[in-house]
Each structure stands twice: as C-alpha cells, then as structure tokens.
Image (spheres, rainbow, N blue to C red):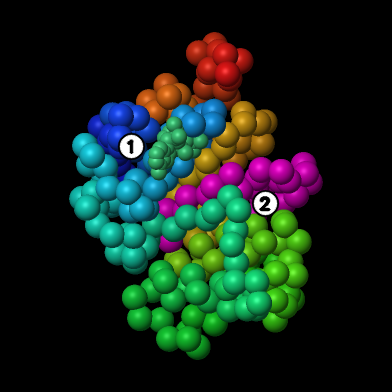
C-alpha cells in the first residue's frame, strides 16, 4: 500500500525552480533514502511533504488522501513527522519534556500526563530513559539526535522524515543508530525516509531504495546499491 505519493510536484522561489515536476511513491513500511548534492532540492522536498511549503504545481497524497494544501499541524496529526539536522531542543527543559512536546504536537488531544508517559516509552526505545530528567542542553550531540528521533516518534508517525540524521557521526554510532531505526521500523510498522547529502556506504545498510535528486529534478530511483554505482550518479557527485 502506498503511504505517500508525489505527482509532478514543483516549487519555485522567484525564478529558481527548487523542485521540478518530481513524482515518486513510498510504500507502507519502506525504508528509503533521498540523496543528492547540496542545493539539489532535498530540503524543499521535505518541506513540501510536511507542509512548510505548498507546491506551485502538482499534488501530494498521504494514504490516498490529497494533502497538497493541508497545513503542517494537520499533516502531523495524520502521521507525518520529521527530525532536523541541527536539533534545537529547549535546552533548559528536561529531555523528557522535550520529547513530550512531540507527543502533544502529534496527538490532537494528548494531556500533559499522557504526553509525558508517551515520552517515557520512546526514551526507552532510543536508550535515553536514564537521562530523562537531565536538561536537554547537557546531552552529547549523539544523544541530542536520539532525543530528536524520540521526539518525532512520540508523534506516533506513520511516515518519519529524517534530516541528515547520520551526518558527522562516527561509524560505531552510525551502526547503533541504523540498528535502532531498523528495529523501530519493524516494531512500529512505519515508513522511514532518510535524507543524505553525501553518498555514504551507511545508506546501503539502511535504505532498500533511494531517490537521487539533481538540480531540483529526480535523476533516478531504484535499488540502493545499483543506484549508487550508476555512472549518472557518480557523475553528479564528481561533477560538483
Ligand atoms: P538541498 O536540501 O538538496 O541542499 P534545497 O532544497 O535546500 O537543497 O535547495 C534547493 C534550491 O532552492 C537551492 O538552489 C536553494 O538555494 C533554493 N532555495 C531553498 N529554499 C529557498 C528559499 N526559502 N528561498 C529561495 N531559495 C531557496
């Protein structure tokens, strides 16, 4: 079953076409990568999917429903969550409170107590439960990423959009995070999209399929290993 479908989606900023007639679908439960060099349109694509931007042309469907013109919070309630590359937590609030904000944003009517209980569940999932009462500002960069994942999961998403979640991490932390995401995907039965600027081997361990963006257009999509070895993709990166 398709969870997300983009049909000929275009977004312009003045004369610049940031996303140009992009179409693709994501299946329920799928792990997929969106790769492409800096400026290729990945962030704009995310912002179109979660409702920060409304496309100039084209349509976006979520579970078959036309969400093209719905605002961010409605899409969050429907089940679209995203993380940010540079998490900006409320540093003086506790880790638990930061994650609870996700639950309150995702659920239409979660009370504070319910949201805190949901936060505890997902802090256990990402392995941060022991730090729940620490101020978020005291976490290490990896822990902040994990908290960001917990915050997004606390929205109970059906589709999780991760923004450069592995950037700048060492190989053992990347392995830990990939294993965690695999487990979450199976246990929560959600689709996970991971945005990656630099072609890295780690994406082959996580995404079954990738979509390659180049100058606002979809260059190609397909099975991860095949796509990453495709001469057109190699050229896009070497030609930078
Ligand atoms: P990526 O995430 O792949 O680095 P972006 O989606 O951020 O790419 O950017 C795609 C293009 O759109 C770039 O040329 C960028 O400068 C431009 N762009 C992105 N956001 C805006 C904006 N808010 N206003 C004007 N131009 C933008």
Rendering coords of residue 220 (x, y %): 42, 22
Residue drawn 46% across and 42% down?
A: 43
Residue drawn 59% across and 44% down?
A: 164
Decide: few, some or many residues near mark 2? Use Cα within 10 Å; few <14, some 14-19, many ≥20: many
Q: Which mark is residue 157?
A: none
Toward the viewer: 188 or 54?
54
Rendering coords of residue 16 (x, y %): 34, 30
With 84 as the anchor, is 155 left or right in this view? Answer: left
Is 173 colored magenta in this rendering? yes
Secondary structure beneath dot 1 equals strand
Decide: few, some or many residues near mark 1? Use Cα within 10 Å; few <14, some 14-19, many ≥20: few
Asked whether residue 183 appears in the rendered view, the answer is no
Secondary structure beneath dot 2 equals helix
The residue that disc 2 covers is 177
Q: Which residues are magenta?
A: 157-180
User: Do the numbered discs 1 and 2 sit on residues whose CB atoms are within 8 Å?
Assistant: no
Q: Does mark 1's beta carbon lie closer than 8 Å to ligand 1?
A: yes
The residue that disc 1 covers is 13
Residue drawn 41% across and 69% down?
A: 106
The C terminus - image quarter = top right
């Amino acid at each position: 079953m398709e969870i997300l479908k983009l049909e000929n989606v275009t977004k312009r900023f003045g004369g610049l076409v940031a996303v140009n007639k992009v179409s693709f679908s994501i299946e329920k439960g799928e792990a997929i990568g969106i790769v492409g060099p800096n400026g290729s349109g990945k962030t704009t694509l995310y912002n179109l999917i979660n409702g920060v931007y409304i496309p100039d042309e084209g349509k976006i469907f979520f579970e078959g429903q036309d969400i093209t013109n719905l605002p961010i919070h409605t899409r969050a309630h429907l089940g679209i969550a995203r993380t940010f590359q540079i998490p900006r937590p409320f540093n003086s609030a506790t880790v638990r409170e930061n994650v609870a904000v996700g639950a309150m944003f995702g659920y239409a009517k979660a009370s504070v107590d319910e949201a805190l209980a949901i936060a505890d569940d997902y802090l256990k999932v990402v392995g941060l439960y022991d730090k729940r009462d620490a101020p978020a500002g005291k976490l290490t960069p990896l822990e902040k990423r994990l908290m960001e994942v917990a915050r997004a999961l606390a929205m109970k998403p059906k589709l999780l959009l991760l923004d450069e979640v592995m950037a700048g991490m060492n190989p053992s932390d990347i392995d830990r995070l990939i294993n965690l995401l695999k487990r979450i995907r199976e246990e929560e039965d959600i689709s996970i999209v991971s945005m990656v600027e630099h072609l890295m081997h780690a994406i082959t361990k996580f995404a079954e399929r990738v979509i390659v963006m180049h100058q606002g257009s979809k260059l190609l999509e397909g099975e991860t290993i095949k796509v990453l070895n495709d001469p057109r993709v190699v050229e896009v990166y070497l030609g930078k």
